[in-house]
Image (cartoon, rainbow, N blue to C red):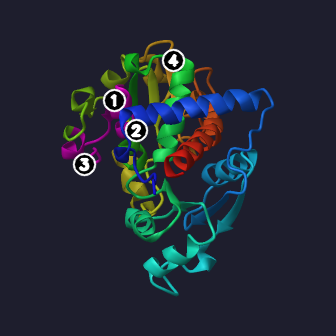
Amino acid sequence: MRHFLTLADCTPDEVEQILDISAELKEGYEAGNRPSLLANHVLGLLFSKPSLRTRVSFEAGISHLGGTSLYLGNDVGWGKRETPSDFSRVLSQFLDFVVCRTHDHSDVEILATHADCIVINGLTDKYHPCQAIADALTLRELKGNLKDCKLTYVGDGNNVARSLALVCDRLGMTFTIACPNGYQLDQAFLDSLPNAHLMSQTDDAEQAVSDATAVYTDVWSSMGYEAEEAQRKRDFADFQVNEALMAKAPSDAIFMHCLPAHRGDEVTDGVMDSDQSRVVEQAANRMHAQKGLMVWLARQTS
C-alpha cells in the first residue's frame, strides 16, 4: 500500500510523475474533460483542523474523477472512543483514500501503519506536502525548467517551509529561507537532503530575494501557536513581504502564499493584490495537483 505522508517518501522521478499527471489532468479539465479514472472510489476527509482549500479541492477533485467523498469531523472520535489502531483498521474498510488533516504528524503515521487504504497527509504540524506539490506545479507552469528556479521563503520555518525544502530538493530547485534567528528550519534536516548544496538559511530578507524566481511567505503564527502571536509579530516585523522588499527582487519574480493570509502582517495588501501575485493560481492548483496525486497513488497501489 502506497501512502503520501511527506515528500521525503518520494523519489525525484516520482515527484515528476505526479506533476506530469497533474498537468495532463488540468489540461483536460480546462478543455471540459472529466475522465472517470477513480470511478467507485471513496475518499474520506478526516479533519481535526479547519480547512477551506484542502477540503474543497479534494472533494471537487475526487468528484471530477468519478469518485465520492465523505467529510469526517471531530464527531467520529479519532483517538477518543477507541484506540487509533482500531479506528484506522475499521475506517479503511469503507474507504479507498483517507486524507488526514491533524495537529500531530504521528496521527497520519498511525493511520498509515494500520489502515488498509491509501493515506494522504492533508496537513500536520511537520509537513504540508499537498501544498508543496501544488506550488511546484504552479512554478513549472509559470517558469518552465524548475532547475533554473530559486524559491525564497520569507517567514517561519514551519510545516510549509519544510515541505517546500523537500520539493525543491527533489526537483533540483534552489531554496532559501529568510527568517529571524530561532525560527529557522533544523539545519540537520537541510544538511540531510541529497541536494543540500541548494539549501540555505539567512536572516537577511533583502539579500535572499535579490535573485529569487519566486518570493513565498506564510502566516507568522500557524494553527497551534496563537499564544505566541504577539511575540512573533515583534520578531518578524522586519520580515514582512511588502512593496519595498519585492522591489529588491527581480522584476519578473512572482509572489506566492499558501493562504489564508494575514494581510498587514506577513504580507501587505499591495503585494497580495499586485500583478506579481499568483496566490489564486496556487490555490486553484491544489485541486489539480491532488487529482494527479490520487491517480498516481491509485496506480501505485493497484
Residue where numbered disc 2 is placed: 164
Residue where numbered disc 3 is placed: 182
- Mark 2, Cα crowd under 10 Å, few <14 / some 14-19 / many 20+, is many
219 up-or-down from 150: above or below: below
Residue 200: horizontal and vertical position, in percent? 25, 31
* Circle 2: residue type: Leu
N-term-proximal mark, 3 vs 2? 2
**What range is drawn magenta here?**
164-190
Residue where numbered disc 4 is placed: 143
* Circle 3: residue type: Gly
- Identify the secondary structure beneath mark 3: loop
Residue 129: horizontal and vertical position, in percent? 46, 46
6 up-or-down from 87: above or below: above
Residue 250 tag number: none
Decide: marks 4, 1 in contact (CB < 8 A)?
no
77 up-or-down from 133: above or below: below
**Residue beneath the point at 59% across and 34% down:** 22
Mark pair 4, 1: CA separation: 15 Å
- Identify the secondary structure beneath mark 1: strand
- Mark 3, Cα crowd under 10 Å, few <14 / some 14-19 / many 20+, is few
* Circle 1: residue type: Phe
Residue 175 tag number: 1
